[in-house]
Image (cartoon, coloured by chain):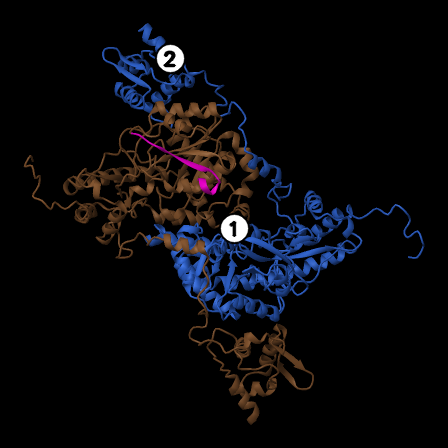
Chain colours: A blue, B brown
Amino acid sequence: MGRQARRAVLLSITLEENSHQTLQAQIHGQIRRAILEGRLACDTKLPSSRLLAAELGCARGTVLAAFDQLQAEGYLVARSTAGMSVARDLPDDMLAPAPTKSAPHTPMLPPMLPERTRTLLRHARAPQTAPSGNAPIAFPLGQPDRQAFPFPLWAKLLEQDWRRPAWPIAGTPPPSGHPALQQAIATHLRTARGFDCAQESIVITAGVEQSVSLFARIALEAGEQAWVEEPGYPGIRAALAAAGIRAVPVAIDEAGFAPETARATAPDARLAVVAPSHHYPLGTVLSLQRRLALLSWAQRRQGWIIEDDFDGEYRYAGRPLAPLRALDRAGRVAYLGSFSKLLFPALRLSYIVLPPALVPVAQKILPQVFTPAPLMGQGALARFIAEGHLASHLRRTRLLYAARQKSLMEAAGRHLAGLMHIPPDSGGMHVVACPTPALAPTLDDNAATAVALKAGVQVAPLSECYAGPRKQHGLLLGYAGTPHHEIDPAMRRLALALEAFMPRHTGAGDPMGRA
Amino acid sequence: MGRQARRAVLLSITLEENSHQTLQAQIHGQIRRAILEGRLACDTKLPSSRLLAAELGCARGTVLAAFDQLQAEGYLVARSTAGMSVARDLPDDMLAPAPTKSAPHTPMLPPMLPERTRTLLRHARAPQTAPSGNAPIAFPLGQPDRQAFPFPLWAKLLEQDWRRPAWPIAGTPPPSGHPALQQAIATHLRTARGFDCAQESIVITAGVEQSVSLFARIALEAGEQAWVEEPGYPGIRAALAAAGIRAVPVAIDEAGFAPETARATAPDARLAVVAPSHHYPLGTVLSLQRRLALLSWAQRRQGWIIEDDFDGEYRYAGRPLAPLRALDRAGRVAYLGSFSKLLFPALRLSYIVLPPALVPVAQKILPQVFTPAPLMGQGALARFIAEGHLASHLRRTRLLYAARQKSLMEAAGRHLAGLMHIPPDSGGMHVVACPTPALAPTLDDNAATAVALKAGVQVAPLSECYAGPRKQHGLLLGYAGTPHHEIDPAMRRLALALEAFMPRHTGAGDPMGRA
């Protein structure tokens, strides 16, 4: 027994009765590790299965099965007379002593990072969350109210939708999205935005960026130019670039995007990406004349318009203006909408309404150019819309957000005077605070954003919305996701943080005494 | 009254009491349309609100509100004494007669399609579904059994997960995925695949393509080379290309991917993408020697290995071999898994286990290089795994699919003799049928796939899995999604379809009479 006992000790096999692994798996795994770590050298003869089984107090069949597995994997070879031995043809360098057991996955050398990854690391931004972690904080951008959405209802709709799903949905869903959701959106748009579109013209996407990129890939040649609003949503420029399109920033004026300026800037462009209902981030509403002029350009030029109606649902004064798509009689407008900001961000469902002439084209090439949007919530969202819950959710949140905007404007009046002013905005989920002439020369909005975050206030820099060199500085303040009682204290903290950016008056006022 | 009555007729305003639109919206919309379609010319004076209200039988306030809206939008202007007129400064070309009302969205000219879109259209493939539409059909690839998955349970887990979601999940979910799912996968891998990994090293993705592309972006410079298996999964080559990596096909032999062949083919490559557990599409299992040689290469070269364990869970003979990741002591292996084929395709959830040294890098740059995976089902999937449902689902389907593979092999023996032979496969969800020497010279697998589909049998061409010029022809037959009773009749239909590809014997056998 002495010899076999010593071998078993050498192998250090310890069987645990309460392990999640079977006895066979434990024996197999421990012998394999011993071989790989060099504790069992090549050609070493193993004890017989009978003896090992006796030593370990398990059935011989268990040991035999482990041996068979190790033999099938190439760790062991069977010697005709002498039982099993460790295989000879394992590469030597794999048999070196293992690193310390406590860190089996620590790489021996730091990985060589490619230059493009190092560049990304240099540009990586600290996550825009408060030091306090998950605690609610004013004024996050693009965040709806976290209490407003009826999650228990949503959970019930999900349950209903997945209890007995049709196999075409659960198996190979169509790339353009859940047909019930396409239908519900078409109906919603007819009622809420005043235009008709065929269910087939709607493609469900994972976000506005995917919508823009998809459209540009279908409608434009790589290398063509597109007008984008300056300032504007940075994600749109990135999405165009991903589709090989050159985004040409066109500075907007008080009335929003100016088609004449655009034509003067880049006469060859064949796509305009605009947010006529509510400019991002400034909130301008595009006038009817400019809407019609833009449509007229698209028709004459055989160009295209992407109408980004990202928060057209939130308008607190007057009725929403008719979208470009409702005025478009030449079929040149692709309309974009999104549910992620209206309902909750993790939903990640948006859509594009394609111009009718591109619908058959898209149906054919979609599988080649498009990763379908997440399907899991699409059926529930279809029910949410069709059963009227979206309409009532919008009614409720419209009142809620209008009240929050009002609170925010009042708090700004109390605390930001002399530092920033906030132009009125007829809709949306955020406002833009612009520095007063006193603060403007010294305000860097990226620095101010960082200082505000330290003070527990989450804002976003306006300058990030500019692509060109002439950037305005200012702060974007989201109010939709900020409860009423947090608005005033947060505004006070923001004002304190901004004081640091005011120029120091080293002298005593105006040296000429003219003040 | 005559004049106003005539005007009202001219305007053709018809109010419907049962419309989903308010009376005000109906008046507004119909006047706007009349202006846009040129039926109300510039400068036309409108009837007074009082007279129009009387004419239409509604409150005067309703008409006034519609007028206000039209004025705000720029369609109407107020004349001090004479009420409302149609605005003068609308572009003339928008006022042309509208196209026929029945097709308000038909474009006037066919759109100019870019060359890249026309190229895609030329390469667009007819959808690979049967003429019969949604009816089940043998032998779809990558489809699990549609009865096997417990959807009522899934629906309940979804409901539980979304009833009261934490806001960090519903609001701004982490880009790497739901923490509960990362945790559940780490535990699953420990038990089922025999290796430990930190929860933070797992990134949830929308599919193997996204996993490959993400890893290549982080670990390699644009322009670097990667070895891929020839034949292999075409999606992997496309994903590498999307990350700027040149995929170099390395022909596999009977033992699978050969590291020496790879080094001879492209010595500079710094990434190997392999499916060692079960090669796609041929089913080869990579030997231990080659696994160790590959790991040894990666360690010496400071290179990387992507281990695609796409269906390692389905092995019907013996126990699964230890994955590369479990043997990797230098931290050079990224491990890929997927749930879409195991559970149901619409789930679209996969994952990558990053090498430990790349985890902190990925955490910093993920927001810049990655569109997060669909979140809606991640919490439910975490529960599905943690509560043991995945393990029992795998146990059940493993038995089911093993039985189906056996039925398929028997049916092939009965019907395909002389046409195709199917090498045995120890696992997976499909087999590969290879032409006999008699059929090989005349078989085009793309043509055969089309002919089979007409006969109601869905197969896939083997040649599509090749990137290089030396393509083998054959047919991939998925059996996991094909019920037992459909296997034999489908195989008979497939055999009949393949007869058409047999060379015609114009003479009477061998002219030399040696047969």
Rendering coords of residue B428 (x, y %): 30, 37
| Viewer-side label of 1, 2 | 1
Region rendered in magenta: B240-253
- Please give the chain letter of the residue carrying mark 2: A
At x 56%, y 54%, the residue is A147
**Type of amino acid at the residue the image marks with label 1:** Gly
Left or right of A90, for residue A64: left
**Sooner in the amino-acid sequence: mark 1 or mark 2:** 2
Q: Residues within 10 Å of mark 2 (few under 14, many from 20)?
A: some
SS assignment at label 2? loop
Foreground pick, A267 / B354: A267
Residue B72 seen in this snapshot: yes
User: Residue A356: x and y, percent?
Assistant: 44, 65
Q: Which mark is residue A41?
A: 2
Q: Are marks 1 and 2 on the same chain?
A: yes
Q: Which percent across, then down, holds residue B169? A: 52, 46
The foreground one among B197 and B470 is B470
Identity of the residue furthest to the bottom in this view: B2
Q: Chain of mark 1?
A: A
Three-letter code, disc 2: Ala
Crowdedness near tag 1: few (<14), some (14–19) or many (≥20) residues, C-alpha within 10 Å: some
Residue wearing tag 1? A244
Is there a contact, CB below 8 Å, between mark 1 and mark 2? no
Say left or right for B87 vs B483: right
Quadrant that contains the C terminus of chain A: bottom right
Quadrant of the rendered image containing residue B149: top left
